Amino acid sequence: SLVPVAELLKKAQEGHYAVGAFNCNNMEIVQAIVAAAEAEKAPVIIQASQGAIKYAGIEYIATLTRLAAEKASIPVALHLDHGTSFTQVVQCIRNGFSSVMIDGSKLPLEENIALTNKVIEVAHPLGISVEAELGKIGGTEDDISISEREALFTDPAEAERFVKEAPADALAIAIGTAHGQYKGVPKLDFERLKEIRKRVNTPIVLHGSSGVPEDAIREAVSLGVCKVNIDTNIREAFVAAARLVLEQNPKEIDPRKVLGPAREAATAIIREKIRIFGSNAKA
Ligand code: G3H
Ligand code: 13P
Ligand code: ZN
Ligand code: NA
């Protein structure tokens, strides 16, 4: 059965590693995530973004993941990524998700706290974990300068207040990462992460982690990041493998011949990430 993210992150915090949270949007990626975690003997989080929900539907994602988790010998969690509303959170809970994120980062602080608490009130009695976001992570395509992005970073004092007033199980922070493919190399604000970690005991989540150099990920994990989100690197590996098959065999008409290698490529990159996060051999 699906395990709550809080449980996985508590162990990760104690063991000084991070659990990989991998985005899925089809059967092949769900299978790749579980196969990789199984091969590495790692606890794992499968998560569904807004785009994934729109594409596959909450029910398909939940059913595929539940089946994969049942067959697996490692702990698997199913998490809503960047949940947009209380209604969506309830829909995911109803469909068996073991964890939800409510992303109130665009709201004023008080409203973010209030919305997060509303979600905690319904989720916690059901044993479901809650991730909140403070600071704005944004995307690599956002047309903003470095100093403009810095202005959106998480404020350590605000983070301390946030987790006191809205006791979420995980807190996503903005320290220089962004969603999608980076143009250059992202620079993370490790001093800020240290300051946040001093004031906040809640497990910290790093979003936008695809494209962040391996050393920076390791450093972030050593400074208290317990959950690392990866989507783009899976998409890149999956589509590159499919593209190669199609280029080499322009007459190919069997989807399995295209998606099979894509699934294998996704499995390989996820295994690599798991080892970087240090969650291998932790299941
Ligand atoms: O939230 C992070 C995802 O990488 C964005 O995914 O385009 O499927 O909504 P999406
Ligand atoms: P990337 O696509 O940049 O890896 O970000 C994933 C993410 O943060 C999902 O919430
Ligand atoms: Zn994210
Ligand atoms: Na990224």
Image (cartoon, rainbow, N blue to C red):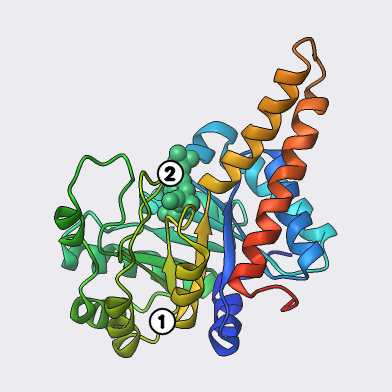
Can residue 182 be seen in the rendering of this structure? yes
Q: Is residue 115 above or below residue 68?
A: below
Place of residue 23 in the rendered image (x, y in percent of width and height, measured from the top left): 56, 50
Around disc 2, counting alpha carbons within 10 Å, would you say few (fewer than 14), some (14 to 19), or many (20 or more)?
A: some
- On screen, residue 119 versus residue 271, left or right, reads left
User: Are circles 1 and 2 on residues that touch, CB within 8 Å?
Assistant: no
Place of residue 182 in the rendered image (x, y in percent of width and height, measured from the top left): 39, 46
Q: Nearer the viewer, residue 274 or 23?
A: 274
Place of residue 3 in the rendered image (x, y in percent of width and height, measured from the top left): 66, 69
Numbered label attached to residue 181: 2
Say which of marks 1 and 2 sits in front: 2
Place of residue 5 in the rendered image (x, y in percent of width and height, measured from the top left): 57, 70
Q: Quadrant of residue 127?
A: bottom right
> What residue appears at the point 39 percent right and 87 percent down from the top-left corner?
201
Q: Is residue 180 above or below residue 197?
A: above
Q: Which residue is mark 1?
A: 202
Around disc 1, counting alpha carbons within 10 Å, would you say few (fewer than 14), some (14 to 19), or many (20 or more)?
A: many
Q: Nearer the viewer, residue 243 or 39?
A: 243
Q: Is residue 85 above or below residue 283?
A: above
Classify the position of ligand 3 by quadrant: top left, top right, bottom left or bottom right.
bottom left
What's under tag 2, amino acid-wise? Gln
- On screen, residue 70 versus residue 107, left or right, reads right
Q: Is mark 2 within 8 Å of ligand 4?
A: yes
Q: Quadrant of the N terminus?
A: bottom right
Q: Nearer the viewer, residue 66 or 221?
A: 221
Q: Is residue 161 above or below residue 22?
A: below
Q: How far is disc 1 from disc 2 in space, using C-alphas?
A: 28 Å
The earlier-in-sequence mark between 1 and 2 is 2
> What residue appears at the point 65 percent right and 65 percent down from the top-left corner?
274
> What residue appears at the point 74 percent right and 76 percent down from the top-left corner?
283
Q: Nearer the viewer, residue 214 or 4?
A: 214
Number of marks drawn: 2
